[in-house]
Image (tube, helix red, strand yellow):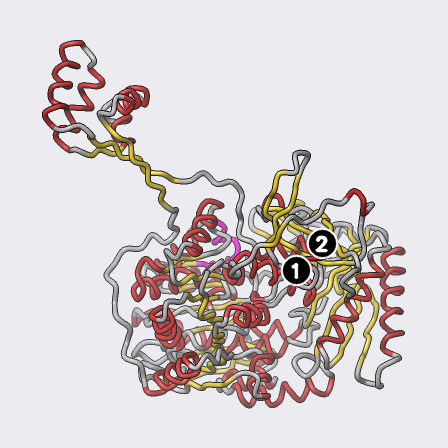
Amino acid sequence: MQDNKELYADVIIDIVHEKVDRPFQYRIPHSMTGYLEIGTGVSVPFGKGNTLRKGYVTRISDRPEYDPAKLKTIHSMELGSITSEDRLVRLAAWMRRQYGGTMIQALKTVLAPQKAVKKLEEKTVFLRWSRAETQEYYAQCVRKGRSAQARLLKELLEMERLPYSLITAKLNVSAAVIKTLENQGIVKIETQAYYRNPVKLQGIMQPGKQLSQGQRNIVDEIMREYDQERHGTYLIHGITGSGKTEVYMELIGEVIRRGRQAIVLIPEIALTYQTVVRFYKRFGERVSVMNSALSAGERYDQCKRAKEGEIDVIIGPRSALFTPFPNLGLIVIDEEHEATYKSETTPKYHARETALEIARCAGASLVLGSATPSMEAYFRAQQGEYRLFQLTERLTGGTLPRVYIADLRQELKCGNRSIFSLKLQELMKDRLEKGEQIMLFLNRRGYAGFISCRECGHVMKCPHCDVSLSEHKGGRLVCHYCGYEQPAVNKCPSCGSKYISGFRAGTQQIEEKLLSMYPGVKVLRMDADTTKKKDSYEEILSAFANKEAQVLIGTQMIVKGHDFPNVTLVGVLAADMSLAVNDYRAAERTFQLLTQAAGRAGRGEKPGEVVIQTYQPDHYSVVHAAKQDYHSFYEEEILYREMLRYPPAAHMMAVQIFDKEEESGQQTAERLGGLVRALAEKEKPGDFTVIGPAPASIGRINDIFRFVFYVKCRKYDKLIETKEILEEEIQKMHVTVQFDFDPMHTF
């Protein structure tokens, strides 16, 4: 741009979270042209009195949105080192470009909640006068009947310092009396702020465990490059139980010794408790957590503690990535293959790619770890973009569990109509007699299952969404998309038949069947319904770890990362249901689930066994998972991805259109799809592919019609350019459009 050309900047004032609603446009003075960039802190005149306020530049343009004569001019730029806020604003701009959405949406994603939260303060009252002076005044108070002052002074003569709350509550001395003594100079009130700490753990700190040679080699190699300021990205592919967490903790210890901080991402809130306990024993009170279960005050205080250097390690799901550490040195993403690392709300960022950008800006290293790496991470390791390390032995010296595949089709032929195969029944009986623990994994929720008529085939559907209603206990039919509820039915509304019922295969029913087979067995259930309360994850996991129950039944959250040495049997009930999903990641997701589930067994000294119950025993994802053979699975799956140009062999962008009117939604989808097809015609055949548009797999949710088309291209930057062209077109239309790059689910 020419120096003499007028430029304008969008500025967010103060970036207080509740005020991040819209930017204000300012004129950029010529003296700042070429120096001002997105994320730069500026001082601007604001409001009627033109009070100078701090703000951050979020966009630079040569087009004024208002009459240029009425626009105010930026007063000055902030010079000096880049603050954590500067970095986060720049990150928001990067996310907006990479993933779509507005700058405001990106800022609300990355900025810590800064809503006015009441500070916690501790007040202490102590004497300023000498003992002799105080005793003389105390005697005077007694003579003149100033009983409240006398009570306080008597206690202070004995203790010298007293908590303010104790004085007002226990001594029944009012704030006015304390203030009178303070004004006379007899006492002084000292106020000390303290932070809310969500980690309520006590115990003795323990040194790190002795690392195996394989673990030590990984730590030494990463830190050697770190000290050479080669901050790379590393993938640790370690079988379940191979000690990846010990490697993370050793790396974090090394980074802390170098005066820097670390972020540890875990996929689910459910994993936080076990992980925090291990880290707390190693690093003490320098560890904290960040997740959605914290109160607003707790979240605010953890950000303040991080900024002020009071903590060195933060642990949490993907939002913990935006902790404002001033000197970040390491990011660890455990179980990096998990779908929960991808945001389902705009901007639909992936924590792995976003962590790469944060590490690049902060001069930090990024470590990814998994027993079943994502296709994307392993593909990049094969391409040389990431450095790959392998851990192939279990630390206990034990072997991987023995896995049995139970063919449910054969079970039915043999007359077994139970939800438990004969092999699983045999092994469960054996474990219960030995006092060992069992985990039963089911990829379903509650009594979730569709209700249908066996006479005419009618399915009970939500009137607002194109999905079936699910049966829940208490005689309720519930829509899991919009929350619609209605009473259960005992007659078909279509033909009047009484043969209407649901396919009941939820965690509650598994529990009931188990109790009917083994009366008196102690069972814990962990699913979306039993973990609604705060701290419910920790309570269930602690109870199981303390052997208060012999069996833990649950959905996906029980198979991820937990370590229970007394678990010697894992039953996987119909986990291959995920293969039926119309999704290009179905085989990968099934392989990961089965491998992770199998990895929960035999993590202690006792050997483990696993029973995988399936209707597709010959599917390559089931066969390779039973052998825990990731490499063979990867080789088969990558051929399929290459052939059809799915991620990671190419990149894909889903363009999602939402409209209250079905016809106008379809017209918008066709118009935008046509625009992209015109762009595709300018490219080499096969380089740029458009699929659709078509109604989404669930065509309507909450009375909003949904349409989608997909764009596939080997170059990510080309998809970003396409998104930007579509964004310009969308500005002229009254429609909601979302972009999802390399989506985790087909839409």
Image position of 613 (left or right of 45): left
Which numbered dot is residue 683? none
Q: Is residue 144 above or below residue 137?
A: above
The image quarter in which residue 649 lies: bottom right
Q: Is residue 530 magenta?
A: yes
Tell which of 266 and 356 is nearer to you: 356
Image position of 123 (left or right of 697): left
Amino acid type assigned to the residue bearing label 2 in the image: Ile
Residue drawn where x is 60% and y is 86% of the image: 620
Amino acid type assigned to the residue bearing label 1 in the image: Leu
Residue drawn where x is 49% and y is 64% of the image: 557
Question: Could you say where residue 540 lies in the image, as x and y percent from the top left?
Answer: 40, 57
Q: Is residue 81 magenta?
A: no
Does the residue at mark 2 contact the one at mark 1 (Cβ under 8 Å)?
yes
Residue drawn where x is 17% and y is 14% of the image: 141
Question: Could you say where residue 325 lies in the image, as x and y percent from the top left?
Answer: 46, 60
The N terminus lies in quadrant = bottom right
Q: Is residue 534 above or below residue 167?
A: below
According to the image, label 1 marks what residue?
Answer: 36
Q: Does any portion of residue 500 appear in the rendered image? A: no
Residue found at the very far top of the displayed protein = 144
Residue drawn where x is 40% and y is 63% of the image: 313
Mark 2: give few (<14), some (14-19) or many (20+) Cα within 10 Å.
many
Q: Which residues are magenta?
A: 525-532
The C terminus lies in quadrant = bottom right
Q: Is residue 173 above or below residue 675?
A: above
According to the image, label 2 marks what residue?
Answer: 28
Cα–Cα span, label 2 and label 1: 8 Å
Question: Which element is circle 1 on?
Answer: loop
Question: Which element is circle 2 on?
Answer: strand
